[in-house]
Amino acid sequence: QLRLVESGGGFVQPGGSLRLSCAASTYTFDYYSVGWFRQAPGKEREGVSCINSSDNGTNYADSVKGRFTISRDNAKNTFYLEMNNLQPEDTAVYYCAALRRTFRPCVSLSEADFGVWGQGTQVTVSS
């Protein structure tokens, strides 16, 4: 059964960078399109980015385009979110997730499409 564990959150000043990692527990990790979501205090969880299982195609929320980069290393059963030029509005709990169905592309950042979730990692951006 697929399980996901995030790491890499922390505190950073505006303009700084962090890299989040999400380790998968199964050798079938490469079957899944995966993504990142975040939830800020008092707000609903929102999609940040996702990457396909097959062609490594990616989607990004408009708010992070040009600043965040998603990638995956199937040999390590791990995917990443590189976050640059972080701003206070990026402060949130970040969750990694995998699509419910295998061998499907990530065509949107709809939370309903994702069926496996990590526990979340806090990212705080403040001066």
Image (cartoon, rainbow, N blue to C red):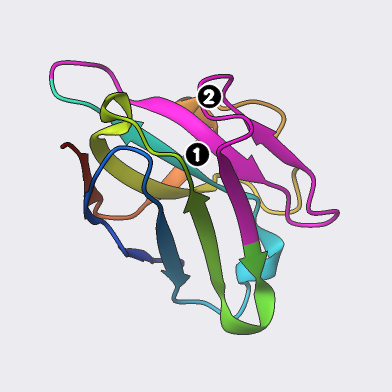
Whether residue 53 is situated above or below residue 85 in the rendered picture? below
Instruction: Report if residue 1 is visible in the image.
Output: no
Please state if 13 lies on the left or on the right of 25 as rendered.
left
Callout 1–callout 2 Cβ contact below 8 Å: yes
User: Quick check: can you spot residue 68?
Assistant: yes
The structure residue drawn at horizontal position 40% and vertical position 59%, both measured from the top left corner, is 20
Q: Disc 1 versus disc 2: distance between alpha carbons? A: 8 Å
Instruction: Give the crowd class for mark 2: few <14, some 14-19, many >=20 residues within 10 Å.
Output: few
Residue at (54% x, 32% y) in the render: 113
Which residues fall within the magenta stretch? 42-71
- Dividing the picture into quadrants, the one containing residue 10 is bottom left
Quadrant, the N terminus: bottom left
| Closest to the observer, 103 or 84 | 84
Number of the label disc, if any, that sits on residue 110: 2
- 81 vs 107, left or right, is left
Q: Amino acid at mark 1?
A: Phe
Name the residue at 24% across, 35% down.
92
Looking at the image, residue 96 lies above or below residue 2: above
Q: Position of residue 106 (x, y in %)?
A: 69, 37
Left of 8 or right of it: where is 58? Answer: right
Residue behind mark 1: 114
- Please rate how many residues cluster around mark 1, counting C-alpha atoms within 10 Å: few if below 14, some from 14 to 19, many from 20: some
Numbered circle sitting on residue 58 = none
Question: Relative to the observer, which residue lies in front, 100 or 87?
Answer: 87
In the rendered image, residue 123 lying in the magenta stretch gets the answer no
Q: Is residue 27 above or below residue 86?
A: below
Q: Is residue 78 above or below residue 110?
A: below
Residue 91: % across, % down: 24, 34
Outermost residue toward the right?
A: 55
